[in-house]
Image (cartoon, rainbow, N blue to C red):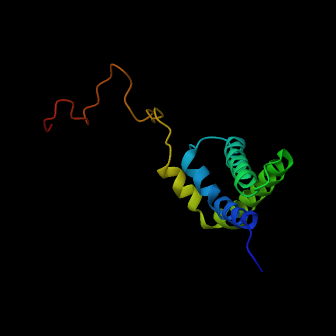
Amino acid sequence: MQVTDLSATSLVGVVVMVFAPLLVALLTKASWPGWVRSIVLLAISGAVGVGNAFIGNPEGWKPGLVIVNAVIAFVIGVASYFGYWEKTSLPDKLKAVGVSDKGTYDISSLPARGTYDPGIDYEGRDS
């Protein structure tokens, strides 16, 4: 069996889409809703679909081929997330490494403005 350019690029697309949920976990914030993450995965799937259609089809690309490749890539990405990556909890660990929510601090433990707490060393000296 001879490997053609189309099947080689399709294989690369499958490998990329198996690891795409990890890329989505790195690119999104942990507080973002799931629909935003799915749109990011859909964008990666679209890029894989366009890449497969342009690189893998030497006669020229066809819009229908792009759509079919993108849908197949999205299904592979979702299936790899729910079938494998979610069980390993690796995406949750990568969300902590990736883009973080800046400016969200818990200030409920701070004293109210204008109050004095004798247990806090305000001037850097031991009390």
The image shows residue 78, relative to residue 66, as above or below, that is: below
Say whether residue 32 is left or right of residue 115.
right
Seen at 86% across and 48% down, the residue is 64
Horizontal and vertical percent position of residue 75? 78, 57
Seen at 39% across and 24% down, the residue is 112
Question: Residue lying furthest bottom in this view?
Answer: 1
Horizontal and vertical percent position of residue 96? 50, 51
Question: Residue lying furthest left in this view?
Answer: 125
The image quadrant that residue 21 belongs to is bottom right
Nearer to us in this view, 2 or 9: 2
Horizontal and vertical percent position of residue 57? 77, 56
Seen at 72% across and 64% down, the residue is 5
The image quadrant that residue 17 belongs to is bottom right
Seen at 74% across and 57% down, the residue is 78
Nearer to us in this view, 3 or 16: 3
The image shows residue 20, relative to residue 119, as above or below, that is: below
Q: Quadrant of the N terminus?
A: bottom right
Nearer to us in this view, 48 or 100: 48
Nearer to us in this view, 75 or 62: 62
The image quadrant that residue 116 belongs to is top left
Horizontal and vertical percent position of residue 72? 80, 57
Question: Residue lying furthest front in this view?
Answer: 59
Q: Quadrant of the C terminus?
A: top left
